[in-house]
Amino acid sequence: MTFKHLGIGSGPRILVPLEIQVQTIAHLRDRGSNHEEGFLAWSGIHRDSRIIVKSAFIPAGEVLRHHLGIGFSDDAIEVIANKILAKGEKLIAQVHSHPFEAFHSETDNRFPLIHRKGFLSIVVPFFGKYGFDRFDYFRIYEYLQDNQWDWIGPETARKRFMLEGRGRGTKWKSLKNSSLARKGS
């Protein structure tokens, strides 16, 4: 498995509402309190050249834990897929935690929720201890094709991800004067 850093920074901007950030970190920390990796899926909608994360889904049912990490039964994945479709949303990313530094393991490379160009895999270090305040510590990968992933470095991630509640006097970091920030969408 090779990683390519192709500088694919021109993808759509991804808006992550504060509610999704809180839900994500709470789940990762909860699992981490048991020394287990946490996992969830983000879905959302495309609006213009942006993706807005609308939902976070935690797989229910059988969790397959092994020395390589965690996995889920086909039934658990199907439940998530059906919920996403029922909401009229698309699967955007899988988010999971590691106990220490964030990296993409061979298991992460080979077994994402879906193999679709543009799908994101976000790895959060230290079981989410630092939350989104240390977003630069996250490792973000974008699926290319044929089990190849592009690492999205911190500089590109800062351009592509907008986090609600992280700017001074604005609703969205990096969207200072946009109509989306003014409307509170």
Image (spheres, rainbow, N blue to C red):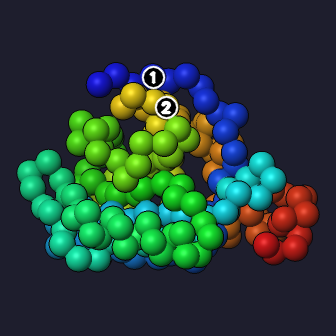
Q: How far from the left and from the top, in percent, is residue 82?
A: 45, 72
Between residue 103 and residue 11, name the one nearer to us: 11
Q: Quadrant of the C terminus?
A: bottom right
* Left or right: 148 as drawn, with respect to 5: left
Q: Residue at x 41, y 57 (%)?
A: 95
- Does label 2 or label 1 sit earlier along the sequence? 1
Confirm whether residue 35 shows in the render: yes
Identity, as a three-letter code, of the amino acid under mark 1? Lys
Q: How far from the left and from the top, in percent, is residue 79?
A: 37, 73
Q: Residue at x 62, y 70 (%)?
A: 88
Which residue, given by chain and number where applicable, does mark 1 sit on? 4
Q: Quadrant of the N terminus?
A: top left
Identity, as a three-letter code, of the amino acid under mark 2? Leu
* Left or right: 149 as drawn, with respect to 16: left
Instruction: Judge depth for marks 2 and 1 and give the one in front.
Output: 2
Q: How far from the left and from the top, in percent, is residue 112?
A: 35, 47
Among the 4 quarters of the image, the one containing residue 75: bottom left
The crowd level at tag 1 (other Cα within 10 Å; few <14, some 14-19, many 20+) is some
Q: Is residue 141 above or below residue 150?
A: below
- What mark, if any, has residue 144 been given in the picture? 2
